[in-house]
Image: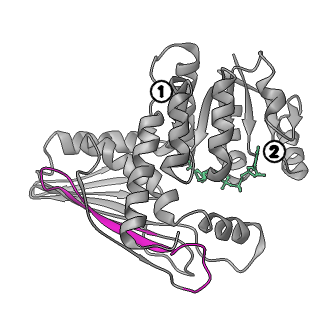
Amino acid sequence: MIRLALAGLGDIATHAHLPALLRSERVEVAALVDPLPERLAAAARLVPEAATHASLTPVLADPSLVAVVVATPPWVTTGLVRDALAAGKYVLAEKPLGTSVAEVEQLTTAPHERLQVGLTYRHDPALERLRDWITGGLLGSPLLIRAHIYDEPRAADGRYARRMLGTLEHGAPVVHEGAHLFDWLAYLLGGGPSEVADAWALATEPGLGAPNLGGARLRWPDGTTALTEFGWWTDALPRCEVSVLGADGYAVLDGFTFDLQLRTRDETRVARFPGDRTTRSFDRQLDAFADLVTGRRDTAVPGLDEGLAGLALSERIVAMAGGHE
Ligand SMILES: NC(=O)c1ccc[n+]([C@@H]2O[C@H](COP(=O)([O-])OP(=O)(O)OC[C@H]3O[C@@H](n4cnc5c(N)ncnc54)[C@H](O)[C@@H]3O)[C@@H](O)[C@H]2O)c1
């Protein structure tokens, strides 16, 4: 049983990490950390036996806690990860690991072989299946990938609105959502793009911390091209999906369910996997982390390199688009 702490008890922690931690028979949530007393109290109702702390410091001093799941905003995450690694903890940290490459590069001098990055959905079997279709030659090559990552509709006020507007102050959607998408593309295509051909950004209203729409055209050495779009904060949002088109076939990944469809001249195939995407991916992510902590695997996947690669690409796109970050 791995005794661990969960730090940051906001939306993703309470809706996805904590349920996965409580479902797992390999971990025990022994401590909860958040500076906000109401968040601590709400999480403590679900795990009454866990210790509660307003800061990570007591967790770092407790040798019985071997790991920390960090689910804080990215502008807080880098420092907590650095301190936890320095204290010898294994860390599963939410993406992005920070808001700039310069900041996150500090972690390269920490013992980061104990760090797994929360690029959650790369653990989903749908991505593995799509990669098999691509590498198995079912679609042909080169490929045209159209990735439309639209999430987070505009809201009038309240906690969600404050969180989203606050997050925009720390970077455009390409920084936050790009962490996932660029990891999927690198996973599917065996590496990141060789070129950012062009990039754009657009704010649909004044006063936002960063443009809420944006994207880039990415190219790989074989000519494969990805047209990527990211968007938040409009009342209605386009479909969220990733499609892959080659001479021999067309595959579509539903961005929310991760249901897959393949069409070729000869067949139409649908691939659906058991359970919902969040449960499936968070359970598998946690299993991979437990394997790392117990020594069943010796490399964190995805680790710091993957986290940094996505952030570097986002940063390049923001700079090319001339966003007002
Ligand atoms: N993997 C995914 O699918 C996924 C989905 C959504 C969000 N995220 C990421 O998860 C992170 C958190 O997002 P969220 O939507 O839950 O945000 P949130 O604002 O709802 O929650 C963050 C929590 O961290 C707490 N916190 C702040 N400073 C802290 C500190 N020093 N120590 C401990 N706790 C601290 C806040 O009080 C808050 O409760 C972000 O990086 C986001 O990008 C990942």
Q: Quadrant of residue 86?
A: top right
Residue 163 or residue 153, whichever sits in front: 163
Q: Earlier in the sequence, mark 1 or mark 2?
A: 2
Q: Amino acid at mark 2?
A: Asp
29 in relation to 200, above or below: above
Crowd around label 2: few <14 · some 14–19 · many ≥20 (10 Å): many
Q: Please tell me whether residue 88 is drawn above or below residue 207 in the rendered image.
A: above
Tell me what residue is drawn at x 84 percent, y 47 percent. 35
Q: From the viewer's perspective, is 59 left or right of 237?
A: right
Question: In the image, what residue type sits under mark 1?
Answer: Ala
Is 229 colored magenta in this rendering?
A: yes
| Residue at x 51%, y 47% (from the top left corner) | 102
For the N terminus, the quadrant is top right
Q: Is residue 258 magenta?
A: no
Task: Let me know if residue 280 appears in the view.
Answer: no
Q: Where is residue 202 drawn, in percent x and y? A: 45, 80
Residue highlighted by disc 2: 34
Give the percent coordinates (x, y) of residue 241. Answer: 38, 63
Residue stretch rendered in magenta on the structure: 205-230
